[in-house]
Amino acid sequence: MEVNYIFPKRPIHFHDESMSSYLFRLYKNNHFMPNSNYLRELKLTYAQLINNEVPDAIFYRICPWIKESEFISLNNASRILGDLNDSWTYKIIQKNNLKFCPLCVRENFYHKLEWCILPLKMCTKHFVTLQEGCGTCSKPLDYFSFIQQSCMFCQSPLNRLNIEKIHCDIFSNSQLNLIKTLIFKEKSVIFNLEAKDYIELIYASFRFLDGFKDLTGFSQDTMDIFHNQKYKSKSSTILAIAFSNADWMYTSFASHFYFVLDLFLAKFKYTKRYDSFLLFEKIVKRDCFAEIREAFHQYCIQKLESGVIRRDFGVFKEEPQLLQKRKIIRREEVKIEKGVTYGKMFRLAKNNLVQMNQSNKNEYYVDQNTLDMYLKEEKRWITKKEAGLILGIHAASLESLIRANLFEVSLKFSGKSKRINLDEVKELVTRCRGELVKVIPSNYISFHEALIKYTIHNLSIVSLIQLILSGVIIPVRQNSEATLRDIYLENDKLHKCLIDLKVRNLKEQGYFFSDLLKVFKIGEKRLRRLLKEHNILPDIISHYKDGRARFLYKETSKLRIQEVLVGRNSNKGKYNRFKSESARFIENEILMHLRSLKKTWKGVSLHDPIETDKEGNDEITLIDILGSEADDVVDAVQLKIEKAKIYKNLEILDDREKEVVVGRFDLELGGEERTLREIAKELGISRSYVFRIEKRALMKLYQEFYKAKR
Ligand SMILES: [Zn+2]
Ligand SMILES: [Zn+2]
């Protein structure tokens, strides 16, 4: 077929005219309408012809006089769809109902390509609403009717034109944006997206807008975008409004975005929420949506924190790392994941250490940041028990180390108990380790042996540690990770140090009244009388809070008393020396015994009165005799060895003495150590009497021990 003969009249082709439009005008000008034979010969279907889907090759066969250069590109539907998937055709391309601009057709009566876009409802040249269908009967228009300019249903001419000017900028900008991306293939105004990404984002956003009134103020319509497929999805008006709403959603980013999401969450529950969020999450995974994805994730975290959505939301399953970004977590999660009890959380919140808020649903939310900071800090503070394990000493000894200011303590952590600075504990054990040796020399004794052995010299765990820290005593050890339990000290050197120390201390500080009693082994009454007779006054008087005074005598005063006493007791010197050593031994024995009892303290208090002086005045308590060093840990095994040495001479005691000593100091096999009170009850005598019997018995035993030693 020679087309030149069929189409002698050739109308001008407009650059923005759709292919279908040009073909229909061509036919009309030549008084010819295509029949099926004609179409078959061109291999063109009727649907292709009326839907603007004419392939380029066929178009050139029909109109060979049109040069390719006259087009920017060919104006069929595939130009609009571009690289969009086929499934978009029905969403983007207007079919079965032609629309046009009433002002454009007054200038030149042809159909423009952009009017094929379904969501377009505005002329981008005149900013008026596109007219859809017959102005008289509202029935859909096709190309035949449009080109003939008369309705095929009511036969009325197409001259009833409705001109509605559009004043809404959001709407018109959105419509321009649509044309730019779909016809001119420019990047979208929002986020600079390719047409394909732009359309996908808009359609994914519809899920959040569906069912809401137009948010842009352009109309009063409700965006029923998905549910009424039959009618709504084909309405270009509703689609155009939805497009402008989706555009609006991404302006003033991210406040409008969050506003829409809030509306959506407030209105919808359950499946719709989950599906829409999940679909959106999938779309925004692409790099081009990075900014939106970030904002979306922020939003999800924030809503999870405030309890609007839950952690089983699909978004969090898809992106589990999002859960780590939360600032606020539900109390239940804190308990499971961080092992913090509700009680502890309450206490921390009460003390303003951790922020915790109660939601209106009676759920508690904990601020992750402050909690983590607290937990991190808490790890630096350990209990006495933990510190004891690191140091290799009993937890009970820690208190005396704390009192000696060896560690910084805090009451901020874990209830009422003191916590000790871990770094300082570690540092102390490192500093006390001394030198690494292959074999421990035989003249060295262990840390604990030293404590037991030199209790007589008032050696406490604190003073021993201080001796080591000061470098006077350098310990040795066999293993690199040694604790105090594993270190050894040179016996002779330690002994000498302690004697030097004691002498120096007494000389520097002076003697309390009670010290003088011990040093000279005389009664309180006698000493008072002596001081009065010789007018020896205390050098320092210190006052207690309760008003009692304590007298301190310096070395010179002590020497004066000694002179007086030596003058009087020159004959009794030997006896006194023995008595003092013996008494000290007894004290020491009691002290050790009390220490071994410390763990299972059976009613003996250091403040229990044990003796009343002859006038029945001041009670003497254990603490008076023992001083304040009773806290130190003494290894129970070591104690037993010492005891065994002393008590092998039991037969020299009388029955009652034996009863008391055996009962008190656990000498029977399987027998338990008992308190003064228990023995007293059993024997039907007073506690102080038991104590006196015990003292006498110990004295006898010591004499025997002393003899054997000599
Ligand atoms: Zn127009
Ligand atoms: Zn009509």
Image: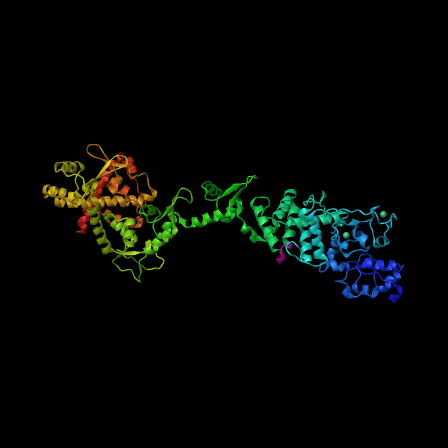
**510 up-or-down from 189: above or below:** above
Seen in the image, is 616 located left or right of residue 324?
left
Quarter of the image holding residue 470?
Answer: bottom left
- Using the image as rendered, state which of residue 505 and residue 214 is in the foreground: 214
The quarter of the rendered structure image containing the N terminus is bottom right
Q: In the rendered image, is residue 652 in sight? A: no
Quarter of the image holding residue 595?
Answer: top left
The way the protein has been coloured in the rendering is: rainbow
Seen in the image, is 161 located left or right of residue 435?
right
| Residue 654 in the image, given as x and y percentages of width and height | 21, 40
Residue 91 forms part of the magenta stretch: no
Q: In the rendered image, is residue 535 in sight? A: yes
**47 up-or-down from 520: above or below:** below
- Residue beneath the point at 54% across and 51% down: 325
- Residue beneath the point at 63% across and 42% down: 266
- Using the image as rendered, state which of residue 426 and residue 353 is in the foreground: 353
Residue 286 forms part of the magenta stretch: yes
**184 up-or-down from 658: above or below:** below
| Residue 3 in the image, given as x and y percentages of width and height | 87, 66
Seen in the image, is 397 located left or right of residue 689?
right
| Residue 257 in the image, given as x and y percentages of width and height | 63, 48
Which contiguous range is marked in magenta?
A: 283-288
- Using the image as rendered, state which of residue 319 and residue 661 is in the foreground: 319
